[in-house]
Amino acid sequence: MILVLGLIILIAAVVVGLAGIFGNTGVGHELGAGGDFSIFGFHATGSTGSLFLTGIVVGAVALLGLALVIMGARRSARRSAQSRRGRRASRREAVVVDRERDDLIQQRDDARAESSAPVAEAPRERGRWFGHRAAHR
């Protein structure tokens, strides 16, 4: 939003400046004693000092617009950099979680393989829990 506002202000200042330059060329628009100048059909009477002051105001507005554009560009660049860092961290975490999951699956498969091997043990007796038989696990 700041970037767009800055662009609008900057473009408006450039248009006003260029209109003042190209609309007041030629011999008939020289500033002398009692001369005038016009911007977008608005005739202003004054001296060279008032024209200079008008130029300073237009330049200050252009500088404000440029500052807003730069500030908006920095903000968007900072947000995109933070987003990239967040995605990288998320990918690293996903890799770690996948590796841990694969390790647990491997441990489970190894335990199943060991338990399916024939072992000469006495059969285990199922225990009772509150008068009911516990389910075989």
Image (cartoon, grey):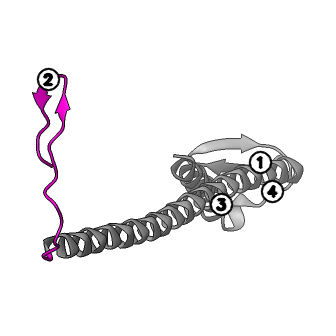
Question: Which residue, given by chain and number where applicable, does mark 1 sit on?
Answer: 57
Pointer 2 and pointer 3: residues touching (CB < 8 Å)? no
Sooner in the amino-acid sequence: mark 2 or mark 1: 1
Tell me the CA gap for discs 2 and 1: 94 Å
Under mark 1, the amino acid is: Val
Name the element at disc 2.
Answer: loop
Nearest to the eye among marks 1 and 3: give it: 3
Tell me the CA gap for discs 4 and 3: 36 Å
Nearest to the eye among marks 4 and 3: give it: 3
Tell me the CA gap for discs 1 and 3: 20 Å
- Asked whether residue 94 is drawn in magenta, I would say no
Q: Which residues are magenta?
A: 117-137
Image position, residue 69 (x, y; %): 61, 57
Sooner in the amino-acid sequence: mark 4 or mark 1: 4
Q: Work out whether 10 lies above or below 77.
A: above
Tell me the CA gap for discs 4 and 1: 19 Å
Tell me the CA gap for discs 2 and 3: 77 Å
Neighbor class of circle 3 (other Cα within 10 Å; few <14, some 14-19, many 20+) is: some
Name the element at disc 4.
Answer: loop
Sooner in the amino-acid sequence: mark 4 or mark 2: 4
Nearest to the eye among marks 4 and 2: give it: 2
Write the residue at 45% across / 65% down: 93
Write the residue at 67% across / 68% down: 26
Question: Which residue, given by chain and number where applicable, does mark 4 sit on?
Answer: 31
Would you say 12 lies left or right of 137 here? right
Under mark 3, the amino acid is: Ile
Under mark 2, the amino acid is: Gly
Sooner in the amino-acid sequence: mark 2 or mark 3: 3
Nearest to the eye among marks 2 and 3: give it: 2
Question: Which residue, given by chain and number where applicable, does mark 2 sit on?
Answer: 131
Pointer 2 and pointer 1: residues touching (CB < 8 Å)? no
